Amino acid sequence: MGLSAQKRVRTIVSYFILLFWAFILLFPMYWVVITSFKNAIDMSIKATYLPFIDFQPGVHAWRYLFVDRLTWFLDPFMNSVLIAFISSTIALLIGSCAGYALARFDYGGRNNSIVLGFMSQRMFPGALFILAFLVMFRELGLLDTRLSLIIVYSSGAIPFIVWVMRDFFEGLPIEIEESAMIDGANRLGVLFRIAMPLAAPGLVAVFVLSLIGAWNEYLVALTLTFREAITIPLFMTMQVSQTGYTEWWNMSAISLVSVIPVVAAGMALEKYITGGLTFGALKG
Amino acid sequence: MATEPRIFSTKRSRFEIRDNLWKWIFLLPAVAIILILLAIPVLWTLYAAFTDLHLYRIGDFETQFVGLANFEKLLSNRSFWRTVRNTVVFMLGVVPAQLIIGLTVALALNNITRGQKLFRTWFLMPLMVSPVVVSFIVGRMLFQEDIGPINDILRNMGFEGVPWLTSPTWAMVALMAIDVWQWSSFMILMLLAALKGVPPDLHEAARVDGANQLQGFWRITVPLIMPITMTALLIRIIDAFKVVEIIMVLTGGGPGQATESVTLAIYRTGVKGGDLAFGSSQAYFLLLVLMIFGGAYLVMTRRAMGKD
């Protein structure tokens, strides 16, 4: 076999593998979309696959969610939005300042150790935190408040942001910052007017990733909230425990509403997000 | 990213002395928050593990120190060891599968030019979806035993339907499938980034020297992608040991105790049951296991950082 024929075979095999895995990822998403348009009759006897052929799609699940029960769904949705945005903003501000400091200042030659100290958070199990948080927030009278989740999620995102942003700032040319300081700017001005705008791609990536983390978190929310401050994942499992697994179409519609915003944001910012996700392991 | 030269301390600002105040204002909030919200729980849990602390008795009873009683109870608790075994089985199932899928798909991606960005973007999708939703969609709906599509397809092909959620073995397989569906993408993206760091002229040189494709892969690609692969594996091992959310949604640890993970056991003991003391000793056991892999992970990361 010639070299070019060999290459062609490799390309065909590659596309086959990629399409196969893409299909594996697609099928569940396709299934949840069509299920959200199914009626009870379409799911009572056998599986149905194709709208208009296997079954007649209807919008009753969507009407149920957005018309009949909108208020009931809106509270957890707003909780999720508020908690995710506020905690990510706090984490971004505090984490990127620390990342900048670790990129530009010398802490007695221990900068790497400080960053590793932050990263050691990864090995601590969530199971350990929920026990302590339950007692801590109970003592503070903060159980079932948005504040409790905002505090936990901010602190959870900071180490990752410090880590990624430190590297990002280190990669920026220092000369611009120096000449601004010669012109009389102070460090705060340099950080917010020069370094931060230049680091915008990194900031976007870590912000969106911490948004997604907060939006999807379940274990801590399950431990600390139960009525007023519940987030979407918790709301979903509560629905299931009330109705059992019978109203598949409603659950599918809720799933889609909870998934579409973050998946759309993540995929639109693919370049930055992949950079943020695979960061750190890729240096050296 | 991998080939970019790192900027070392020589490039730090010569305005450093002037900035002594900012240096601390920028760093201290992050350090303080992490110390408070990491160190306090870690130390408090250690304390709780040596007491008889119970959620429903806080304030009513004097908390007693019980020495190693909780850890002795842990060692003889068969139900707990069952959850340890389940967690290890889960980890041993998902991590190799994700490595194989990750490497295969990453090699395929690295092999093509047209449509690479499209595939990469699509492969990012599962990482954005919450474990609760993944477990609901992939687990509850696809693996549904009567009208779920997987059993339906199997039956149409002439096989028996599989008792996905009622058989202890198959329930574990279903959970593994969910995790593989979601997290293979992480391996794909990490390994693709690693493969992109392999200079193509190295392969050219090897071919000129008479090495075939396979030799080139084993002698050039594998050693070069090894550090990132190890780091990605360690991250996935640590996360697999922490598995809980997909289990809560899919099986609740059942049937029986067949799919209960360590974290689920801790949640049930400490949060649901209120036995903070025993839950804390279980959490410390998990922490000690994770510290082995976490330590290795930190060593890998430290090595990648270069000199300070």
Image (spheres, rainbow, N blue to C red):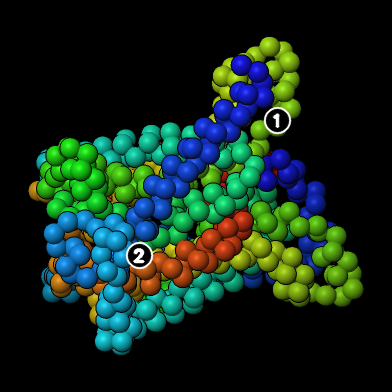
Question: Disc 1 residue type?
Answer: Pro
Q: Label 2 lies in what chain?
A: A
Name the disc covering residue B266, or none.
Answer: none
Inspect this view and state whether residue B182 appears: no
| Viewer-nearest of discs 1 and 2 | 2
Q: Residue at x 49, y 75 (%)?
A: A85
Along the line of sight, which residue is nearer the eye, B290 or B26? B290
Q: Quadrant of residue B126?
A: bottom left
Report the residue that reaches farthest toward the top: B210
Whether residue B160 is visible: yes
Residue B128, image x and y in percent? 45, 59
Q: Quadrant of the C terminus of chain A?
A: top right
For residue A98, which quarter of the picture? Answer: bottom right
Regarding mark 2 in the picture, which secondary structure is present there? helix
In this view, the residue in front, A42 or A171, is A42
Label disc, if present, on residue A33 of the rendered structure: 2
- Location of residue A120 in the rendering, given as x and y in whole percent from the top left corner: 47, 50
Q: Residues within 10 Å of mark 2 (few under 14, many from 20)?
A: some
In the picture, the disc for residue B200 is 1
Badge 1: how crowded within 10 Å, few (<14), some, or many (20+)?
A: few
Residue at the image position 72 percent from the left and 55 percent from the top: A170
Residue at image location 77% in from the left, 70% down from the top: A194
- The residue lying at 81 percent from left, 59 percent from top is A174
Looking at the picture, how far across and down is residue A78, in whole percent? 39, 82
Q: Chain of mark 1?
A: B
Query: How far apart are labels 1 and 2 at the CA level?
Result: 42 Å
